[in-house]
Amino acid sequence: MSACLPIILGVFTLIYTIQQNQIAKDNRLQDERQANEIRQQNIYDKYLEDITKYKSDGNINLEIIRLKTLNAFSQLDIQRKRSIILFLYDIGFIHRNTTEKERLRLDGADLTGVKFIRSSTFHCQLDNIYLSGILASNIIFSHCRMWYANFDQALLINAQFINCSMSYSSFVSADISQAKFIGEANNAERIDFSNSKLIEMYMSLPMRNANLTNTDTFNSQIIFSYNASRVNYFLNTRLPNGTFSIIGTSQLIQDGSAETEYQKYWLQRSGYNAVEQSNESEQIPDAIDGKSYFKLFFNSRAFQDINVRHCSLFIDSDNAWFNLSAYLACPFSQHRKDITNIYLRFYDENLIGIKTEILESNYNQTSFKYQYLTERILPHTRQISVFIGTIMNNSTLFTNINNNSNYTKPYCLIDDMKFNIFKNIL
């Protein structure tokens, strides 16, 4: 027995030491939690004090308030983040129905996991709330009224909207993948989901009168209402089964025949001669479409930019092609090799050129001839610039002008330009 005593004492000492270390560790963690709680409360109190003072003094600089808000969010827990959002909403800083100069933008604000749940003390009345650009995966809204809410460009992956009334809200260019709109009281009428990702999203009630332009609903569980008075709008939409809805682009060039205020749509290239509009008294040949056409002289250039972001989902599927067509002629040129052309430049999201295509008239083309070009559009295309111009031999141009005051400068013609995007079915 006496031989076991040292062993017993050793075991007791070891257990006692472990217990004391654990107690010390628990105390240290408790102290850290208390210190962190005090620090967060101080940050929260100081934030409310500063913003209240800005508001009462009329000294409102939204950029400074935005920076203070983002800084506070980076240090606070989800409960205090929720309180700040409600505070900003109550003082009118994040209302959709205010002017842009009066509205606080919270782009990049981290609201991950924040919960807005109706209770006996919080009615969750958030009509017109403006939360564009927030980072809010796993955010929860429960039994809230949010008519005309704005979540444009927000990250809302796995968000939950439980029994919420959200008519006329906007989720333009938002990522709502795997989100859930659930509950018998859930109202999703006339919501704008254009350009958004609704991949694997679930909605318990039929979607009605929604804008689904360029929206990705792949693998989602959504019931679309086909009631005549509650029909949804599909255009360039990827449907839950992976197929595309109607691909609609029709004519994307503005005033391709110089018919109206063509200078409103066609910009002159700096350092080049102007592109002109013909008039009825000088029309030889006759216009193809309408009453006028474009006249392009030596070194003439003009351009127009086409934004194709509304087709981005379809374009990135690698099934998008374009068709460019026009009537081209050079009836008043001096050289058989004078031509007119339409030059396309394709750009990505960062306006980096990724492709070029050219449609040209033939040599010695003295009368209008219909010509077209059909090619694939590369994925990630977001803008297409259309340039019109000529390639002319100017060897005798200036000599003739100087020697003959009645000399008419040679020019080429373009009429009835059209550009559309379609699905390749081959």
Image (cartoon, rainbow, N blue to C red):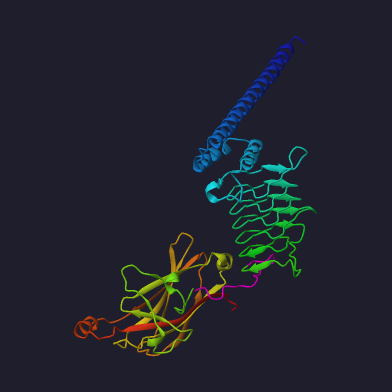
Is residue 97 a member of the stretch shown in magenta? no
Whether residue 376 is situated above or below residue 3 in the rendered picture: below
Question: Which quarter of the rendered picture does the C terminus lie within?
Answer: bottom right
Q: Quadrant of residue 15?
A: top right
Extreme residue in the top direction = 2
Is residue 243 a member of the stretch shown in magenta? yes
Residue 172 in the figure: left or right of residue 297: right
Count of labels in the image:
0
Residue 183 in the figure: left or right of residue 82: right
The residue nearer to you, when weighing 143 against 25, is: 143
Q: Quadrant of residue 205?
A: bottom right
Whether residue 366 is situated above or below residue 89 in the rendered picture: below
Residue 296 in the figure: left or right of residue 103: left
Please provide percent x and percent y for residue 285: 40, 90
Residue at 76% x, 50% y: name it: 163
Q: What type of secondary structure mainly makes up the magenta span?
A: loop
Magenta region: 237-253
The residue nearer to you, when weighing 56 against 142, is: 56
Question: Which quarter of the rendered picture does the N terminus lie within?
Answer: top right
Residue at 56% x, 50% y: name it: 99
Please provide percent x and percent y for residue 363: 35, 87
Extreme residue in the left direction = 403
The residue nearer to you, when weighing 350 against 99, is: 99
Q: Quadrant of residue 124?
A: top right
Residue 392 in the figure: left or right of residue 174: left
Please provide percent x and percent y for residue 6: 70, 12
The residue nearer to you, when weighing 354 against 232, is: 232
Please provide percent x and percent y for residue 209: 70, 64
